[in-house]
Amino acid sequence: MNEEYDVIVLGTGLTECILSGIMSVNGKKVLHMDQNPYYGGESASITPLEDLYKRFKIPGSPPESMGRGRDWNVDLIPKFLMANGQLVKMLLYTEVTRYLDFKVTEGSFVYKGGKIYKVPSTEAEALASSLMGLFEKRRFRKFLVYVANFDEKDPRTFEGIDPMKTTMREVYKKFDLGQDVIDFTGHALALYRTDDYLDQPCCETINRIKLYSESLARYGKSPYLYPLYGLGELPQGFARLSAIYGGTYMLNKPIEEIIVQNGKVIGVKSEGEIARCKQLICDPSYVKDRVEKVGQVIRVICILSHPIKNTNDANSCQIIIPQNQVNRKSDIYVCMISSAHNVAAQGKYIAIVSTTVETKEPEKEIRPALELLEPIEQKFISISDLLVPKDLGTESQIFISRTYDATTHFETTCDDIKNIYKRMTGSEFDFEEMKRKKNDIYGED
């Protein structure tokens, strides 16, 4: 333990594990510790089911009807992977995909006027969709064609829109799209949580819709992937990667003190011993005095014995309830997975509702989502603080990750990873660069 490391990582949440893997691949000497006896930190998958009951202090043990406890792997923080998104790229480049099996999520749905509708994933679906009237469909199709051809490097594709100046509100106006279509485009395709984006330059929104369409094009049913046995598999995959490159892992290690000298981290004390380091990465639970609360997220894990109504009996899906539809400032999300993903007993479904808390009665806020899931066999409710670092870590060399937000995809988590990487190394996170470094170690394939 009394050794020198380049980087010490505390916590085995996904953000920490990916950074630990990347630092190891980049030739750094890494020590990775967690005060918990399991992988995943805040983003763990809990198994067996008995442990979930204990964690949420639900008296008694799960009823027989829930099947075998060890058939369950329940994510505390539900998220899907965008097929063409940043996390999948990280998995492919680091070859962590070797340790994981993914399934495509069967559909994405959007809530409108108390009902749910499938988000059209093909032209044929768009034409058949009851989300829009006939003329609206033609205009929407025109808009999608524009987005598909759009290339921010080629002004010929702009058609009079300036990607850096024209707002998204003006773009919608140009294509004459109505409020319902704007709602589902902004929230179910571009995946914005609020409507702030409407008055910002349209470039990012167009690129987000492109990402959605390209992710969809890869597998057809929906743009989302989900790992068999739950999201807890992801941190473990990156832990293996780190180990291949000489990283050292220790679970169940109490962290007594982070040692700072002249304002800069020099090591970590655990069980009386000190490990020295030049840089430290950790989640907010290790440095409560260096983070601040910026809000709260409510999540409700629901166990069902039936697929969600009006989803065509999908065994996995996502539902987005745009804030406009329920008079809120932020969207409500539902992620549903089932025994098809080896995360629940046969014939059982897990639906997880999440949103950013806006009032003093968070449980009331998510009622519209819970109504879609009835009857619910068992609920597990958690309200967690959203914590962010007070500073960038440049002085102290202590780099702290942000708490996972209410979104049901990993794009915001990947932004945090790239941000921390840049603060640590001074350079942008570059997938191609990682690929080259890997070829130096392994030689060309």
Image (spheres, rainbow, N blue to C red):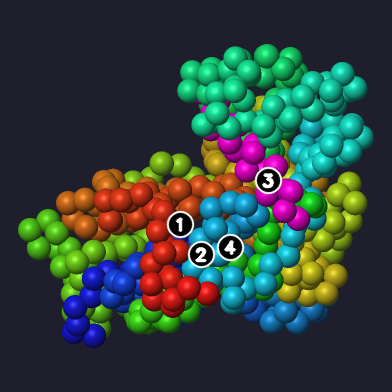
Residue at 87% from the left image edge and 18% from the top image edge: 135
Query: What is the C-alpha distance between the residues marked 1 and 2?
Result: 7 Å
Q: Are marks 3 and 1 in contact (CB under 8 Å)?
A: no
Q: Amino acid at mark 2?
A: Tyr
Query: What is the C-alpha distance between the residues marked 4 and 1?
Result: 29 Å
Q: Are marks 1 and 2 in contact (CB under 8 Å)?
A: yes
Query: What is the C-alpha distance between the residues marked 4 and 2?
Result: 27 Å
Which stretch is magenta?
201-219
Query: What is the C-alpha distance between the residues marked 3 and 2?
Result: 19 Å
- In the picture, measured across the screen, residue 139 lies left or right of residue 275, that is right
Image quarter hosting the N terminus: bottom left
Secondary element at image label 3: helix
Q: Give the numbered dot on residue 214.
A: 3
Q: Nearer the viewer, mark 4 or mark 1?
A: 1
On screen, residue 369 above or below 169: below
Magenta portion: prevailing SS class: helix
Mark found first going from the N terminus, 4 or 2: 4
Which residue lies under the disc numbered 1?
431
- 49 or 95: nearer the eye? 95
Mark found first going from the N terminus, 3 or 1: 3
- In the picture, measured across the screen, residue 20 lies left or right of residue 379, that is left
Mark found first going from the N terminus, 1 or 2: 2
